[in-house]
Each structure stands twice: as structure tokens, then as C-alpha cells.
Amino acid sequence: MPERSQKFKDTSSARFSKLKWLEKIKLYQSLKKGAIKNEVSDSNQRKPNSRRVCKLRCLEVAFSISREWSNMGTESDPSGQATVDFFSGQTKLQQLKIKMMKIPVNFEGILLFFPAISPSKNLHHLEWEFLNCRVTDMEIIAFAQGLTKARQLEYFSLKVIQNSNVSEDCIEKIVEVMSKLDNLSKFDLYFRKLNLPPKGILELGKRILYLPNIDCSCSKESIHIFRKSYE
């Protein structure tokens, strides 16, 4: 498919801004092979109009990049402020699902994200999935810190699927934090392809089961942790 012209993008943006009653959107964005880094930077700096979809209640977004971009750094990433600007106008948003594939992850962006959604008092449902994104302990701890600031959330799901360097201590830490958040009536944490032996994953599961109202299930290379349901 040929690259879309700027005129096409401007026309699409103008038409999109007229959809004032739009309540649900699914977006997919992919950085193709051969893109110029300066063009990507300029594109990221365009600030979205947060009032275009003021009735938005459900948003699903997926981001991916080609292999040649998967090792690029996260320095000078301007997307954090764009996220703040966007969510400042989404007061009706109730459900948000984010999926990232091979995207370089910056813990500072995660820390900015949670204060950005705090004004969205109706946002009760948040799902976040990382697929081969090289998530580290720093990003997981950023989620633990951020969740303490987004107290309107009632459900939170985090999936990390990768050959991960996330440590046992870090997983225990985020579970401990989430178990103490009374607003989270339900949560799911799923880590797959952990760099731990099967016995190490089982031992981690046993330690987590000592936390109040927490349950988990383990396999040879994954662990699923969730709040107990008494329904």
C-alpha cells in the first residue's frame, strides 16, 4: 500500500472531528519498514485534539513496529505529553485496552500515563498487553506506582509475553501493591516466557498465595495471578 498523502490525513482528521457522538473506537498503528526517523518524530509531535470525541466510552488501541525499529532507543520520546493532552478531554471514557507489539517501552511514559488518566473518573476498566517489548523491572514498578494514583480503576489487566528479564521480586512487589488497593475489585497479571526454571515459577506461586485474597496458577514458563472471586 502506498504512503498516504498529508492531504488525505488532514481530510480524514477533519471528518473524524465531526463524529461527536462516537462512543467506541478501535485503532491500529504500525511503523512500517523504511520509515524515516525524522518523519516519525515530526508525526509524534502533532498534538491530537482531545475534544474531537468527547463522548468516547470505549477505546482499543494496538501499536506495532517492524523488526528494524525494535531496537531503537526511547530517548526524547514526545508521546508522553501527547497522551496527557488526549486524556484530558476524555471525561466519558469507561474502558481502555492497549496492546503493544515490539514497541520500545519507557518507564517514564508509564509514569506519565497514570496521572493523565486520573481526571477520567469514569474510567474503570484498563487492560494492557506487551508482546516482545523488552519490559524490565523498571516498567513493572512504574505500573505499581501508577496504580496507586488511578484510584477510579476497578479492573486492571497486565500481560507480559516475552523472553523476559522481569525478576521474581518485582512480580511479588506489584502483586503486593495491587492486593492492598481496595478499589481494584478484580485484576489479572500474566507473565509468559519468564527466564525462570519451572521449579522457580512454582516457588514464586507458592509465595504469592500467602498474600490475602490472591490466587494464581503456574505452568512451566508462565504464571497467572488474580484476585480471588467469592461469587
Image (cartoon, rainbow, N blue to C red):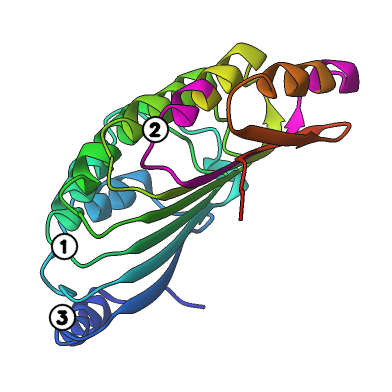
In this view of the protein, can residue 73 be seen by the observer? no
Q: Do residues under tags 3 and 2 come within 8 Å of each other at their CB atoms?
A: no
Spatial CA span between label 1 and label 2: 23 Å
Q: Position of residue 93 (x, y in %)?
A: 26, 65
**Residue 208 is inside the magenta segment:** no
Q: Is residue 177 above or below residue 44?
A: above
Disc 3 marks which residue?
17
Going 26% across and 33% down the picture, which residue do you hit?
149
Q: Which residues are magenta?
A: 176-201
Q: Is residue 186 left or right of residue 166?
A: left
Label number found at residue 91:
1
Please name the amino acid that badge 3 sits on: Ser
Going 37% across and 67% down the picture, which residue do you hit?
59
Q: Is residue 101 above or below residue 15?
A: above
Disc 2 marks which residue?
181
Please name the amino acid that badge 2 sits on: Leu
Please name the amino acid that badge 1 sits on: Thr
